[in-house]
Image (cartoon, coloured by chain):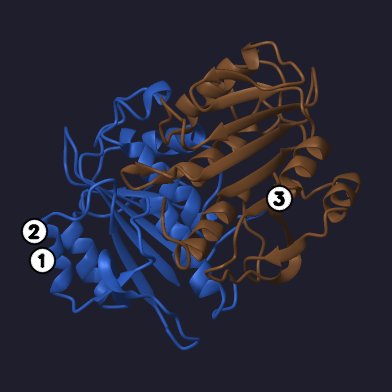
Chain colours: A blue, B brown
Amino acid sequence: MRRFVVVGHRAITSGDFKLNDLCGSTGRLDVLLRSINSAFFLSHDLRRDVELYLILQGEPDPPKTIKLVGSELKYLNPDERSTGALIRNALLKRAYPHEQMSTPGIYISKRGFADVVQSLAKVSKILYLREDGESFNATPDSGEFTFVLGDDKDLFEEEEAIVLKHNPDIISLGPISYHSDHCIILVHNILDSVSPFK
Amino acid sequence: MRRFVVVGHRAITSGDFKLNDLCGSTGRLDVLLRSINSAFFLSHDLRRDVELYLILQGEPDPPKTIKLVGSELKYLNPDERSTGALIRNALLKRAYPHEQMSTPGIYISKRGFADVVQSLAKVSKILYLREDGESFNATPDSGEFTFVLGDDKDLFEEEEAIVLKHNPDIISLGPISYHSDHCIILVHNILDSVSPFK
């Protein structure tokens, strides 16, 4: 299982936004929507062995976590607008401390970053993507990974402190700084070369 | 200079489409829009040393070629909708055999695939992305590359014949088949590791 946690620092936490202005009116939810595409889409296939956690920390009701589960996903298309509609549907549901399904494979809750990272650290190795990290080289026995990354902003100091508590590997994907969704593509490709695709 | 040629097999060749239905009404222009994001965007920067050629082969007036030039681009944002608006602006212009600028860095013409590939083969090595290709490994002296790839469909037989005339390297990016825009991300990352970023 490959897991990704993407922090949407100011991503909107209500469904009150227009699909026609995903870039301007949603606290850069568009970055997270592109991360969904990267996490799950193969050519004419979906990656089933992936979970993606989007941590929404913007107004009006932070935090909320939207979890996407590859093995259960339905109705997901690669374009930003239709993915935005699925996420808006999730945000239109009332969020509780425990996860609730919105559409198949998409869950919403009031969980926050610390809670999500702590629970994932129990079942997987945490890898924190940071520009000054070590080069990431997977080996066939690399096991279960959770990759943690920011949106268009790096993790804030207090968020980084949460991650560092779990003894992560700090990794980098190249000599320059990439968009979050591009990082997910690169991680998948590195793991694809050593792990069978599921 | 890194160059990419993406064939939009049924991508619309007029500006008569709705930005609210990029996925359904444009012959999968959305695939090409995501390729634009992949070709040019870095975290808080644009790749200047890149050219992208989108070959539009759909109705009503095929072929048309839209060329994007990194060193000249303005007004480009990472989201699909605003990129779609820039491309629609280009398609609303009358297309001639020679390129005409639409907005800074975006050019439209009536050029077709064979013409574009032939002219690029004169100034660069052609690399053709195909699932059964050899693993792509760049070296520091790799020089000028043009990467040729399809949209959600592989190149048709007659298109492949055009490419093969130019003695391409046939390359693959991994053990499974990726979306076009994801391939561009992977190519960039491989080249970034050996070539200085411009």
The answer to which of B34 and A146 lies nearer the viewer is B34
Residue A49 placed where, x, y %?
A: 51, 67
Q: Chain of mark 2?
A: A
Q: Amino acid at mark 1?
A: Ala
Q: Tell me if residue A104 can be seen.
A: no
Please determine whether, in this image, residue A16 is positioned above or below residue B78: above
Give the residue type at disc 3.
Val
* Numbered mark located on residue A158 in the image: 2
Q: Nearer the viewer, residue A50 or B195?
A: B195
Chain letter of the residue beneath label 3 in the structure image: B
Indicate the position of residue B148 as horizontal and vertical percent values.
71, 50
Q: Say whether residue A111 is left or right of residue A194.
A: left
Please indicate whether residue A122 sits to the left or right of residue A157 in the image. Answer: right
Q: Name the residue: 51% across, 54% down.
A: B185
Asked if marks 2 and 1 touch (Cβ < 8 Å), the reply is yes
Gap in Å between the C-alphas at discs 2 and 1?
5 Å
- For discs 3 and 1, the disc positioned in front in the rendered view: 3
Residue B138 lies, with reference to residue B197, above or below; the image says: below
Q: Residue sitting at 37 percent across and 74 percent down? A: A145
Crowd tier of the residue under label 3, counting other residues whose Cα lies within 10 Å: few below 14, some 14–19, many 20 or above: many
| Mark seen at residue B148 | 3
Q: CA distance from mark 2 to mark 3?
A: 44 Å
> Which residue sits at x=26%, y=38%?
A94
Residue A183 percent across, percent down from the top left: 41, 58
Q: At numbered mark 3, what does the secondary structure look like: helix, strand or loop?
A: strand
Q: Are marks 2 and 3 on the same chain?
A: no
Which is closer to the viewer, label 2 or label 3? 3
Helix, strand, or loop for circle 1?
A: helix
- Left or right of A90, for residue B25: right
Q: Nearer the viewer, residue A47 or B151?
A: B151
Q: Which residue is mark 1?
A: A161
